Amino acid sequence: MRLTHFGHSCVLVELNGSTILFDPGTFSHGFEGITGLDAVLVTHQHPDHADPVRLDALIEANPNAALYSDPQTAALRGGRWNAVRAGERFSIGNVAVTGTGGEHAIIHPEIASIDNTAFLLGDDANPARFMHPGDSLFVPDQDVDVLALPAAAPWLKISEAIDYLRAVAPRVAVPIHQGIISNEATGIFYGRYSDMAADGTEFRVLDEESSVEVS
């Protein structure tokens, strides 16, 4: 499996011969020229996960890519978008995909909740080789190999992220959703996650726009 982090929550996953892009949003960069995608997966409707302008251009440049998202985003965007609910399974080439979770984390009780589909990518040997939770702290029943860990958010405290990291207990955790904080501040968050992860979890920061083998 190869991962490329395009900033914030946008991650390109190359697995079992398929190329899958997650959450190309407004705080991400470098994904604009990608072609040959097998699928685009969007966890929820917020623009930092689904750029309303660049996402359309990306889809136009990838006419054969399958499009999957949470139900509300699929309804809003229409067209070729397929809604994925918690518990639903489908395949992208030789990659098994499972929708999990279902709801965005609470920002404030007075702000209406929206859909958020967390996605598991895997195969027959391991149905959770990679997990992208979107804006949620959903803990799946499956043993996750590589977790894209939300590092900073309006709905998240460091203590909650640490508890989530420990609860999922992946072999490898890579931070995402850091676009709301300055680069100078990331060390405060990353240091805590690295130091306080469960035994057996490697916390690994991916250089942005660089493809990395995760094995």
Image (tube, rainbow, N blue to C red):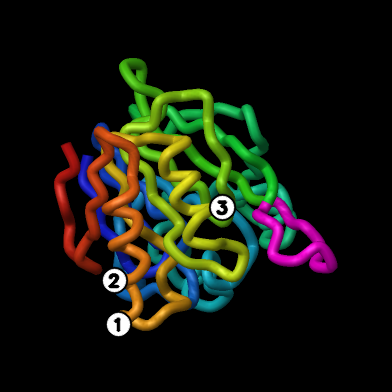
Q: Residue at x 67, y 42 (%)?
A: 102
Q: Amino acid at mark 1?
A: Glu
**Mark 2 vs 3: CB contact within 8 A:** no
Of the 4 image quadrants, the one containing the N terminus is top left
Q: Nearer the viewer, mark 2 or mark 3?
A: 2
> Which of marks 3 and 1 precedes in the sequence?
3
In the rendered image, which residue does mark 3 sit on?
43
Element marked by disc 1: helix
Q: CA distance from mark 1 to mark 2?
A: 7 Å
- Residue 152 belongs to magenta span: no
**Circle 2 sits on which residue?**
187
Mark 2–mark 3 Cα distance, whole angstroms, equals 26 Å
The crowd level at tag 1 (other Cα within 10 Å; few <14, some 14-19, many 20+) is few
Q: Amino acid at mark 2?
A: Gly
**Residue that badge 1 annotates:** 184
Magenta-colored segment: predominant secondary structure: loop
Give SS at disc 3: loop
The magenta segment: 104-115
Q: Position of residue 191 (x, y in %)?
A: 28, 62
Report the front residue among 62 and 131.
131
